[in-house]
Amino acid sequence: MPANLTPQYLEAELKFKQAKTTPEKIKALEVMMAVIPKHKGTERLRGQLKSRMAKLKDELQKRPTVGRAEQAYNIKREGAAQVVLLGLPNAGKSSLLSQITHASSEVGDYPFTTQKPIPGMIEFENLQIQLVDTPPIQLDHIEPGFPNLIRNADALLLLADLTEDPIFQMEIILEELNNMRIKVLGRGLIPSLEVGWASLRALPVGNKCDVKNAMAAYQKFESRFKNSFPILPISAKEGMNFDELKKEIYQILDIIRVYTKVPGKDADLSEPVILKKGSTVGDVALSIHKDFVAKLRYAKIWGSGKFEGQMVKRDYIVSEGDVIELHI
Ligand SMILES: Nc1nc2c(ncn2[C@@H]2O[C@H](COP(=O)(O)OP(=O)(O)OP(=O)(O)O)[C@@H](O)[C@H]2O)c(=O)[nH]1
Ligand SMILES: [Mg+2]
């Protein structure tokens, strides 16, 4: 008997296949189980989903206990996205965290000041983006837990000191990331990678542009990397170019903000729903509640529609700033 799987189910299945972590897999599987058509033809498949869910839940419980050092690298994601700050000793990472967020991380004029990751929140328009300061990248040593922190980030900010051969610093960072089987890219499509590799968006930034001759070094740094990455100079100490930096961080995250409303009321523009670029009305519903996806009939959309209040289906791709009214 044919299973006749719906587009909703297939979409959830795709999310399941793309999920990196066990909790992500469980979430996608929950949706698959909620939306799968319940008839004789899907009986076997439903059984398989159930046992897969049981296995995943088991896995979650049987996690090996992580060591203390590793625990320190387990930074709870907060806000719209998590951006990890990387750089060689003294690049100015902690200065940046302390200046651009309300968090404080010790700054020192000697290398290896920072010993463990420290998170802070960047305020950008109606969003909060988490920035994580980290201990410096070293060629010969990597702390357990560090690669995982990087792999799980939504994007990386690669900070180079413009007063100390920034091109060389960036090459070391890229080499270290490569050793961790992490490919970074600034622009363009994410290539399909071999098993075990991760791919992340990165933004190289030249720091200490307030120092004499730093801008001359920046010009060389920029021409070396600008074809592959968006790139900009800042001064963490003086707070120079922070507005541009925040905008660029938002850009590389590849996310959009949409707003939901209930019929007869205005949308609350201070409460964006954060989605990956290319997300659909179905994803908006899913971000509210998994039961919403199954029940969703149509949506009305203000913004990217052909006209205001246009009726759209669940596969409609939403755009930055859209206001969406979900009808179930
Ligand atoms: N002139 C200038 N100095 C800076 C700037 N940013 C950081 N510094 C100085 O550079 C030194 C190192 O700064 P930190 O913020 O501790 O650097 P870090 O990258 O966190 O260093 P580690 O924790 O050792 O990896 C300190 O003396 C800072 O005052 C900047 O934008 N301009
Ligand atoms: Mg530091």
Image (cartoon, rainbow, N blue to C red):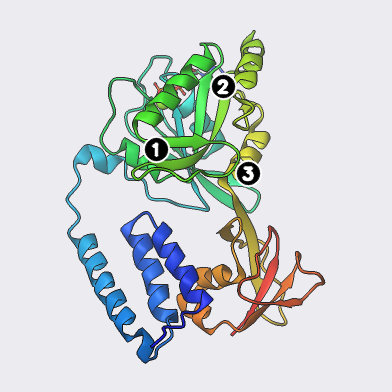
Depth check: give the residue in front, 70 or 191.
Answer: 191
- Mark 2, ligand 1, within 8 Å: the answer is yes
Residue at position x 36%, y 22% from top? 113
Image side of residue 107 versus residue 324, left or right:
left
Which residue is at the far bottom? 40
Q: Locate residue 39, reporting x and y percent.
A: 39, 91
| Residue type at the position of mark 1 | Ile
Question: Are dots 1 and 3 in contact, CB under 8 Å?
Answer: no
Kind of element beneath mark 2: strand
Depth check: give the residue in front, 252 or 12.
Answer: 12
- Is residue 153 in view? yes
Pair 1/2: label in front? 2
| Residue type at the position of mark 3 | Gln
Image side of residue 214 versus residue 194, left or right:
right
Q: Name the residue under label 1.
A: 118
Q: Locate residue 291, reporting x and y percent.
A: 47, 80
Distance (Cα) linking label 1 and label 3: 23 Å
Distance (Cα) linking label 2 and label 3: 19 Å
> Label 2: few (<14), some or many (≥20) within 10 Å?
many
Q: Residue 207 carries which label?
A: 2
| Of pointers 1 and 3, the one earlier in the residue sequence | 1
| Of pointers 2 and 3, the one earlier in the residue sequence | 2
> Label 3: few (<14), some or many (≥20) within 10 Å?
few
Kind of element beneath mark 3: helix
- Is residue 107 in view? no
Question: Are dots 1 and 2 in contact, CB under 8 Å?
Answer: no
Kind of element beneath mark 1: strand
Q: Residue 251 carries which label?
A: 3
Q: Which mark is residue 63?
A: none
Q: In which quarter of the image is residue 213?
A: top right
Question: Are dots 2 and 3 in contact, CB under 8 Å?
Answer: no
Residue at position x 24%, y 61% from top? 60
